[in-house]
Image (tube, grey):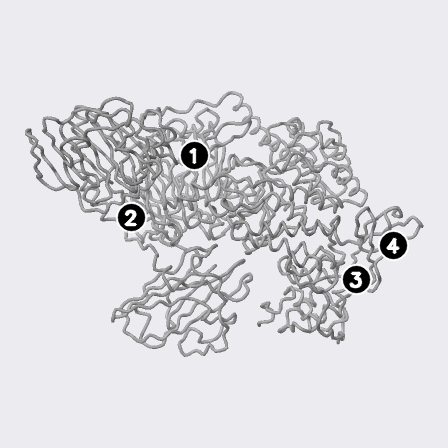
Amino acid sequence: MLLHFGTAARYGCLCLFLLNLPAVVAESPEPKTSPEPKFQILFDGSSLAGWRGVEGFWSVVDGAIQGQTTAENPTKGNTFLVWQGGELGDFEFRCKVRFEGNNSGVQYRSEVVDASNFAMAGYQADLHPNPNYFGMMYGERTPRGIIATRGQRVVIDADGKKNVVGDVGKEEPLVAGDWNDLRIIAVGNRLIHQVNGITTVDITDNDPGAKATGQLGLQLHAGPPMKVEFRSLLLRPLEGQDAKKTLADALDSSASAVSQAAELPQVDDGKWLLAEPKPTWVWAPQSHTNQQVWVRQTVQLEDSIKSARLYATCDNAVKMWINGKSVGSSKEWKEPIEKEITNLLSTGPNVIAAECQNETGVAAFVCKIEIRFANGKSRSIVSNQDWKLSEKLEKGWRQVSFDDATWKSAKGFGDLGKQPWGIPNHEQGSAGGADPLNAKNISVPPGFAIERVYSIPKEQGSWVAMALDPQGRIYACDQGGQGLYRVTMQGSQKPIVEKVSVGTLSDLSSAQGLVWAFDSLWFHRNGGNLVRITDSDGDDVLDHAEVVPGGRSGGEHGNHAVIVTEDGDAIYMAGGNHAERGELAGSKVPTWYEGLLLPRMWDSNGHARGRLAPGGWVTRLDIDAKTQTLHAIGFRNEYDITLNGVGDMFTYDADMEWDMGAPWYRPTRICHVVSGADFGWRSGSGKWPTYYEDSLPPVVEIGPGSPTGMISGEGTRFPTRYQDAVFALDWTFGTIYAIHLRPEGSSYRGEAEAFVYGTPLPVTDAVVGLDGALYFAVGGRGTESALFKVHYIGDESTAAPAPPQRKHIAAREQRRTLEAFHGIADPAAVAAAWPFLASEDRFLRYAARIAIESQDVNTWAARVLEDADPQTTITAAVALARMGEADHAGPLLDRLLQLQIGELSESQQLGALRALALVFTELQKPTPEQRRRVLAKLEPLMPSRFADVNVELVRVLVYLQSAKVAARAMDLITHRGAPEYPDWSTLAARNSRYGRGVQQMLDNPPPAREIQYAFMLRNLRQGWTLPLRRAYFEFLNEAAKTSGGASFPGYLSRTRDEALQFCTDEQRKALEDVTGEDFNPVPDFAIAAIEGPGRAWEIASANQAASGGKPDFERGRSLYFSAKCASCHRLAGLGGNIGPDLTSIPNKFDQNYVIEAIIDPSKVISDQYGSSTVLVADGSLVSGLVVERAGGDLTVYPNQPDAKPIEIEAGDVEEVTASPVSQMPLELLNNLNADEVRDLVAYLMSGGNPEDKRYQK
């Protein structure tokens, strides 16, 4: 039996699924619950429609009615925003409210007594900062004044006498500045106020002047400046038995609220971690891949210890001991060790020891210990530069007796709280009070209600993945090792929670994807395989686990979602960009590549360094054969996937938040995951623009965030538009988005609505229950976890959505027809797909291209060159560049150059430029003649009226070393407009820690597009004048003053450094006042001769020699000159500038690559440094490195090390032919002995840095 809500083909196109549906219905009766009462929505969340008040005081801000007075705009007396829906008698009213500066209130059964000022008289539910008055009843503009203070049950006699006859509610602190739930029940003469589920007053009013009907209003109080906000205003008239039951339930509601509050877990807000002294993140001076360090600190404790607690973590993993006894370990920096350690410490000397492991990129360790002594004193021990560190394991290092005098001092990298780490496990800001996850602090759209149905105790972990079984029970799993649980909802009663990870399943935990299908729970394990869990004996208890072959990737970028396919026959699996793929039986994606025309810059903090395509992926698992077929690629880290009502797949892909401000920053986004798609994630600066013809655009971009769960709205009992939506969860900014999909061609455009949000609200996953409610979990990274329910109580229609329009059904069916050819050889494919290469619908065009690429290239390559339609030519050229061979390059380039590129539409120009780039990167580099032809075609097109076209023109022209692009690109940089960014301020406000960086960028925005130009120009040698160079570096200086993500400053500084490498010596000297460089390439030290004896070094033997013993920095630096490296290359500011600057070697290459480049220099030759032969007008030939100067003059640097450059005027140049032989001489190492090879290679690999780890062994 199959169950998967969100994939039912309600329009009859998923027949196999529908055949299974009766079994699902038969075995899955809905729970018997009373229908929920429906409320009238008084506020639409966006306007003041239906309300009237004094203009200038009332507005709508961030989905709330806001009333505000200021010193400059006071109100002369209390004024009200009055609801225009008529008079109310018996009713129930609900709203959320918060206020500051003065008290407010909700007026009911009242009348307007001053129409010009909208003053009202009658009952008021008072909202007051004084706890005794918060929720009391006040008689506004009546002689009675305060009728009941908070906590009173009052009976008013027929003669008006007030009698306090009892107490109500409980003494729970109420905070005016927090959101509070206000409820008013008025039935006859019985009036009840409740705040946050607690009854504040209960009044029986027999006063002769008591009002039985009247109007409703919201108060803005006279006096000091104030602000009040109302949202989720709901009204329900009451009569008959409904009125009696509502009143009775209200009288009993406090008891349940008290008991629920008593069950809440204790919350550690982590404030002690930021109290002085603050701990410092520490590490070795340099971090590198798979690095281990050992850290220790000895402390003397003189007094008797009462209590002690420890907090520690490490990027990436840590094990800790105190006095040789284990404290604990953490395999993920986001999951710190937090322990009570009183019994591990003693009076006298104590040693704290940590074994730390880095996987890749940036690394650091942090620790804080807080000790309280019996005498009342306290002491904090924090990691800092006083701690000792070693990169070598030594015996006994964990013991107090160990002598660490030879260990180095640790290097500090900033206090706890510094990004990118923040405060792991304490990252979310609190909404105030002891219960940060109180539902009152969570916003939902008008007509919706939210409640916390279960507070997850620490021993059950922090839930991050959920699934629903046929009985409507929820399976939920901890991110760490606390296991898998089954939750059975019981209406208003506490749910039954059973642990599944027992017995033979006791090791099951850490799922980041769950789905119930085929009578099984499918469990995608973080750090493990996909597991199929079944009930072997029919007792309704899961007890058997079967491991499905596949990848075992760990971490938050590893194995993720599992869902049922749209045809109901298989399972889709998702993995992030660090996830290993299982062995593939097939692929809908014909090929993948980096596709970068210019050199990539890896992340300046080392994240995902060396990670190449395909990035994150989705595969289809055949559950019988247990084989996978690749469906789509190119994601950064898509945690979840879902299917909408017609079976189309969507995902919520992650951003790289450290990139913010950089031109390659991609906000979190919703993607329509079609067959064969490549969404273009490439590591570092390599991320593809959304307009690339070999990629696809997102449905909608959202902004910064951390995507987690995703679920279709199908099956909810929500208003119609929400049933057609998909819901996407953002952990960082505590938001569940409703993505409203609008069909566009064969795909969709989307609009993101903040559906549920709170601060904090680290949402992780969601399911749609059989009751039509949306259930979601919060938690992750060890944070406090809970399960919430969102349901609809408004009066809007919840009818099923109407079927899509016929044209959208036809477009989607056409796309699916083309997708049927993906990954298979079919002789009908090319003819069927070819007409759609010209489609204006990118998704149809893409599907057609993949269908053609899936066929033998020789069956369609010739047709590419024959088609006359420009769009068909462009799309087909992309296909041939991706799938063809080198001999296709010339004819394909000829065909592309026949296009009148400047006369094409913007998208076609972008497609043509991308096709040219792919010819060069995937087929063959251009010959000098081809280069001249392409330059002649493209240089006149710049500048374009299209900004993105300018970006791609600069990219191609820099690659071709155009002598004109520097001036034209610098003109675009110099005459730039103001940067434009989406307004993410509201989003940023939902998380003060992460949002602070976002807001700083919005307040001080970088010129991202111009940074893109500068980034590409860093690789340009040709066409620079000193004024252009000065303007370039001045721009980089200005850009560096703006704000961006954690990697943004590093990208800019490395762009500057790499651009300097292409400057002439004269330019570098002249620009010292702008660059801050003290440029002097002449060595100020003695250069020793090579000692030898040499030998014929091969790659293997040279690698062995380079790895033996501790290198000598000074001898390596001397060898750099005596071995003639410095004749052409500059490193650390020293040497020549004919060949590439080698300073950045450690950021780009490993040792084997460098040695291979020295021994076999012609194997890979950079376009910018390859040798060429120049035929001069007098018939002579000149060979060497050719550099084109202004006006076409050439400077040729001959291959001989001591030869002087030769100048050739442009008029004397007949022909320039590229040479397959490198400018670099062979056998450069052969004069060196083994120690000299080691020292020279170490100098190169260190980038000329004497502090490099290689010299610290």
User: From what the image shows, is residue 1218 above or below residue 319?
Assistant: above
Give whichever of discs 4 and 1 has the lower sequence position: 1
| Label 1 to label 3: alpha-carbon separation | 63 Å
In the rendered image, residue 423, in percent from the top left (x then y), is placed at: 41, 56
The secondary element bearing badge 4 is classed as: strand
Give whichever of discs 3 and 4 has the lower sequence position: 4
Query: Which image quadrant is residue 607 in?
Result: bottom right
* Residue type (three-letter) at the residue carrying disc 1: Glu
Marks 4/1 in contact by CB < 8 Å: the verdict is: no
The residue wearing badge 2 is 435
Q: Which mark is residue 1225?
A: 3
Q: Residue at x 51, y 20 (%)?
A: 806
The residue wearing badge 4 is 1182
**Quadrant placement of the N terminus:** top left
Give whichever of discs 2 and 3 has the lower sequence position: 2
Give whichever of discs 1 and 3 has the lower sequence position: 1
Marks 2/4 in contact by CB < 8 Å: the verdict is: no
